[in-house]
Image (cartoon, rainbow, N blue to C red):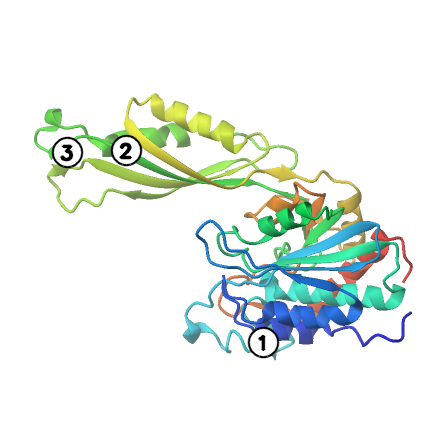
Amino acid sequence: MRTNQPQPPEVLALAQALIRCPSVTPADAGALGVLEEALKPFGFACHRLPFETGGSPRVENLYAVAGKGGRNFCFAGHTDVVPPGDLKGWRVDPFAAVVEKDELIGRGAADMKGAIAAFAAAAARFLRRHGEDFGGRISLLVTGDEEGPSINGTRQVLGWLAARGETLDACVVGEPTNPERLGDMIKIGRRGSINARLTVRGVQGHSAYPQLADNPVHRLLRMLGRLTAAPMDAGTPHFQPSTLQVTSIDVGNPATNVIPAEARALFNIRFNDLHSAASLERWLRAAFDAEAATYDLALHVTGEAFLTPPGPLSDLLAGAVKRVTGREPELSTTGGTSDARFIKDHCPVAEFGLAGSTMHKIDERVPVADLAALSEIYEAVLEGYFGKQC
């Protein structure tokens, strides 16, 4: 053990300091500075990486790394949070980080400043015990653009790392993966997601003379019916069935006796590894072309489906979870997207964090005991990965 280093940060105190920074996307509000100050005394080289591309707001990011060569184990996460919503609904100030009844309450407590505090403290304890010459590297990749458009965040940092020849060998993302209790679930993949905007054009006319018009609403409904008439698939061994959900149909027509000239719909597809964004676009256009309609289809792909097959990384993480909590975590691919969709192109990645039952909600909160237990899990992962003994 090295004795010339300060004491590692206390997990609760660090989580509170992060929550007290109102870092609603894309604002940093000092959150990354708090994290830097916690890491630097333990030998972390901290790189602040602001990016401003694609017409999106400037975003602050942090890549911090410690160690003297060898395999690079990365913890990844985000300090940005969603807005708190109606402040009158909160029983405490959402950015005061109050502890009440053994729970830390505040925006970002679960998603995911609590996990960031947990892995920063775990890394500091590991480095204090083993020093910087432990035969590898520990890195933290923390963005301020996960809850937003995800343009100037993790993806840009990964590009910066690649340009420098910096590699990641394994990564754990601290998203709140557990449905109810710490230790319930590890995410080893995610479904892909596509947001679609369909616009169907017709010919406006009087509803009493439909033969003189071409009703785009009828065509739109038939086109959507082709998509929803049957299940997309039955799922795969690691993925639930793909789904397509129509989220809006809009005509904007105040008159009951006028056939409109245009009708629009929005829908979202969550897809498993039987599909890709390209294959789904082909399926959509084939279905719509069969209607012989005049239409425009705009697609925005937020992520492809991916899987890190069960193996060394998930085994290591599951073993650490079992050691600390006594629970056997389920390996899952449920839920929405995360920045793991970018990291999977660089190294094996899995996700494990706090319980997510209150994330994005009023009075978002996490048990204080779970913060400490999560940090123990992350420390056990580092010990196992680098073959050290506590």
Residue 220 horizontal/vertical position (percent): 29, 32
Q: Quadrant of residue 119?
A: bottom right
User: How dense is the environment of label 3, judged by Cα within 10 Å: few (below 14), some, or many (20 and up)?
Assistant: some
Specify the quadrant that holds the N terminus.
bottom right
Mark 2 crowd level (few <14, some 14–19, many ≥20, 10 Å Cα): many
Residue beneath the point at 29% across and 39% down: 264
Cα separation between marks 3 and 1: 57 Å
The reply to whether callout 3 and callout 1 are in contact (CB within 8 Å) is no
Query: Horizontally, is 269 left or right of 202 in the view?
Result: right
For the point 10% across and 39% down, which residue is it? 257
Location of the C terminus by quadrant is: bottom right
Name the residue carrying label 2. 200
Please tell me the numbered disc located at residue 204: 3
Measured as percent of width and height from the top left, residue 161 is found at: 68, 49
- Local crowd size for mark 1, using a 10 Å CA cut-off: few (<14), some (14–19), many (≥20): many
Q: Is residue 240 visible?
A: yes
Q: Is residue 354 above or below residue 215?
A: below
Q: Is residue 80 left or right of residue 220?
A: right
Sequence order check: which comes first, mark 3 or mark 1? 1
- Identity of the amino acid at label 2? Val
SS class of the residue under badge 1?
A: loop
- Judge by depth and name the residue closer to the eye, 211 or 348: 348
With respect to residue 291, does 30 lie above or below?
Answer: below
Q: Position of residue 200 (x, y in %)?
A: 28, 33
Task: Write down the residue under mark 1.
Answer: 97
Q: Secondary structure at mark 2?
A: strand
Q: Amino acid at mark 3?
A: Gln
Position of 127 with respect to 198 (left or right) is right
Quadrant of the rendered structure where residue 229 is? top left
Rounded to the nearest angstrom, the CA distance separating label 3 from label 2 is 12 Å
Is disc 1 in contact with disc 2, using a CB cutoff of under 8 Å? no
| Amino acid at pointer 1 | Ala
